[in-house]
Amino acid sequence: MKKASSLSELGFDAGDASSGFFRPVADDAGLYTPTAHRRRLTKVSVIGAGNVGMAIAQTILTRDLADEIALVDALPDKLRGEMLDLQHAAAFLPRTRLVSDTDLAVTRGSDLAIVTAGARQIPGETRLNLLQRNVALFRKIVPAVAEHSPEALLLIVANPVDVLTYVAWKLSGFPASRVIGSGTNLDSSRFRFLLAEHLDVNAQDVQAYMVGEHGDSSVAVWSSVSVAGMPVLKSLQASHSSFDEEALESIRRSVVDSAYEVISLKGYTSWAIGYSVASLAASLLRDQRRIHPVSVLARGFHGIPDETDVFLSLPARLGRGGVLGVAEMELTEEEAKRLRRSAKTLWENCQQLGL
């Protein structure tokens, strides 16, 4: 039996329930003329209410980034349970309207639509077959989101995120500036954490980027790592003879594998990606113009061919209009070579999808 989540569902007349508690202010003529609320409300939709989707929704909620959050999932009971669980915390949270439905129409009028829904890999399944299943799922999700919210920013979190960001771009018809993948924003945070622990500083004071694919071929940009404006790599190599090429690759590998370690220990990742995506949402919705390494259309950058519509992570300036620009970061020849190799791998996957 479905339980009611509001007094109106219990049979109480919704009406203007507040009229018995509050009296409007009279103007000089003694008339009550309440004005309409004119502030433009911000709506965020999260498609996929699994562990990642709910961590994102919860973090956005506690950071007070939206006036309305819409949750969408294919499992109606779990979806309603997640919504009620958050609604019951209303007395401890900013005032945010929470709605949920299995129908994507609930996302109508979104400013930001975040897609976490994706098929999981079946044992023995090839990467291409998994991609094809995700493309089939995105064919149901993305055009509907684009129809209901034609001015929205589209943020893709589902993996493989770079290829699925390309898929979302093709299916939505949106300009590339409004289709963004979460990319290596979290990888870069993990990279900064490892360096901060070693240097005994706050991770926020470490400038370090992972670029390229969110995956095995990602590139650690050692040449630009700095703390307080000071280059880190040269200092580390001068003071620690162990910081050779093999050691640097070991650190990069550790960053790439860190998600697998979390999954092996607790079964899934959630909190770090929740905070990562909430930071992207803040930069986008509040027009903060912050730089994030996210998956963007990368053709023409660092020798990537102009005819290659590949999405991969580069440091991008984010604001209310989406991707406002991509930093022309200086890479060593080896770093640029690895980035182009990463782009080639991703583009080969994209070309097999037939979009």
Image (tube, rainbow, N blue to C red):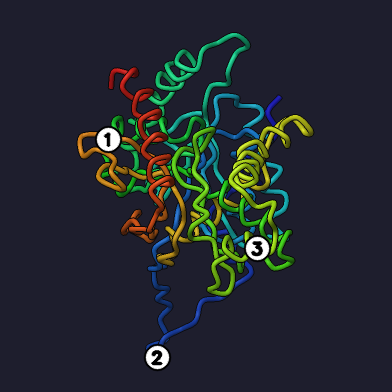
Q: Earlier in the sequence, mark 1 or mark 3?
A: 3
Nearest-to-viewer mark from 2 and 1: 1
Residue 309 badge:
1
Question: How far across and down, in percent of the image, does residue 313 sit?
Answer: 43, 45
Nearest-to-viewer mark from 2 and 3: 3
Quadrant (top left, top right, bottom left, bottom right) of the N terminus: top right
Q: Earlier in the sequence, mark 2 or mark 1?
A: 2
Residue 226 drawn above or below residue 259:
below
**Horizontally, is 83 left or right of 220 in the view?**
right
Question: How far across and down, in percent of the image, does residue 145 sit?
Answer: 37, 36
Along the line of sight, which residue is nearer the eye, 113 or 74?
113
Q: Earlier in the sequence, mark 2 or mark 3?
A: 2
Question: How far across and down, in percent of the image, does residue 341 sit?
Answer: 39, 34
CA separation in Å, label 1 and label 3 = 33 Å
Query: How packed is label 3: few (under 14 Cα within 10 Å), some, or many (20 or more)?
Result: some
Q: Is residue 343 visible?
A: yes
Which residue position holds label 3?
203
Along the line of sight, which residue is nearer the eye, 156 or 308?
308
Q: Residue at x 28, y 43 (%)?
A: 303
**Horizontally, is 182 left or right of 330 in the view?**
right
Please name the amino acid that badge 1 sits on: Asp
Residue 345 drawn above or below residue 156:
above
Please name the amino acid that badge 2 sits on: Asp
CA separation in Å, label 2 and label 1 = 63 Å
